[in-house]
Image (spheres, grey):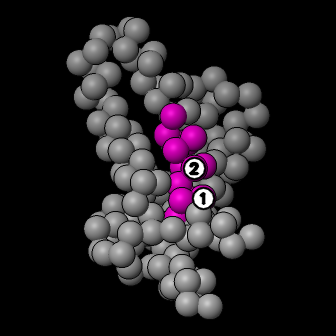
Amino acid sequence: MKKIQSIIFKTVDDYRSILPRLIIGLVFLSEGIQKFLFPELVGAGRFEKIGFTNPEFLASFVAFFEITCGTFILIGLTVRISAIPLLIIMITAITTTKIPILQEKGFWQMAHDSRTDFAMTMLIIFILIYGAGKLSIDYLIKRKFESG
């Protein structure tokens, strides 16, 4: 059990993760809320336009993970676990929306349209590698496990 705890709460002993956490947390929290506020634009309507079956359920499901995991990353609680669903969301977004652009309009249009997806994916990978950092709940929990 202690091994699992050390993996979950493992983090660097510095402040390098603060800005990536703020960016990831605020962007996904905002996007998740917007899926409920503007369902036709970024929620169920968008999922239906992309071609997903049961878009109402799927948009709510994704929004729930964006809000929950975004909040956890923002406050620095179980950031590595929280990053995994967000990485899956980003890979799905790139696969379903950017690959068709690549096929239809070419590399440069896809590169332009996917710049935010690429940046968010890289920040999520950063968090997976380094953890929450010193200014986080993960760091406090890690220290508690190490001390006793």
SS at circle 2: helix
Where residue 102 is drawn, which disc sits there? none
Q: Compared with residue 7, is residue 124 higher up or lower down, i.e. above or below?
A: above
* Nearer the observer, 129 or 81: 129
Residue at coordinates 27% horizontally, 20% vertically from top-left? 109
Mark 1 Cα shell of 10 Å, populated few (<14), some (14-19), many (≥20): some
Is residue 22 shown to the viewer in this render? no
**Of helix, strand and loop, which mostly describes the magenta segment?**
helix
Q: Compared with residue 76, is residue 37 higher up or lower down, i.e. above or below?
A: above
Quadrant of the image containing the N terminus: bottom right
Residue type, mark 2 in image? Ile
Q: Does the residue at mark 1 contact the one at mark 2 (Cβ under 8 Å)?
A: yes
Mark 2 Cα shell of 10 Å, populated few (<14), some (14-19), many (≥20): some
Quadrant of the image containing the C terminus: bottom right
SS at circle 1: helix
Question: Which range is magenta?
Answer: 79-91
Q: Position of residue 43 (x, y in %)?
A: 59, 44
Residue 2 in the magenta stretch? The answer is: no
How many labels were placed on the picture? 2
Is residue 114 shown to the viewer in this render? yes
User: Residue 107's image quarter?
Assistant: top left
Residue at coordinates 31% horizontally, 30% vertically from top-left? 113
Q: Where is residue 54 in the image (x, y as percent from the top left)?
A: 76, 34
Q: Position of residue 17 (x, y in %)?
A: 34, 66
Residue type, mark 1 in image? Ile
Residue at coordinates 51% horizontally, 68% vertically from top-left? 10
Residue at coordinates 34% horizontally, 32% vertically from top-left? 114
* Nearer the observer, 119 or 35: 119
Q: Name the residue under label 1.
A: 81
Q: Distance between the residues labelled 1 and 2?
A: 6 Å
Q: Mark 2 points at which residue?
A: 84
- In the rendered structure, the answer to whether residue 127 lies left or right of residue 81 reads left
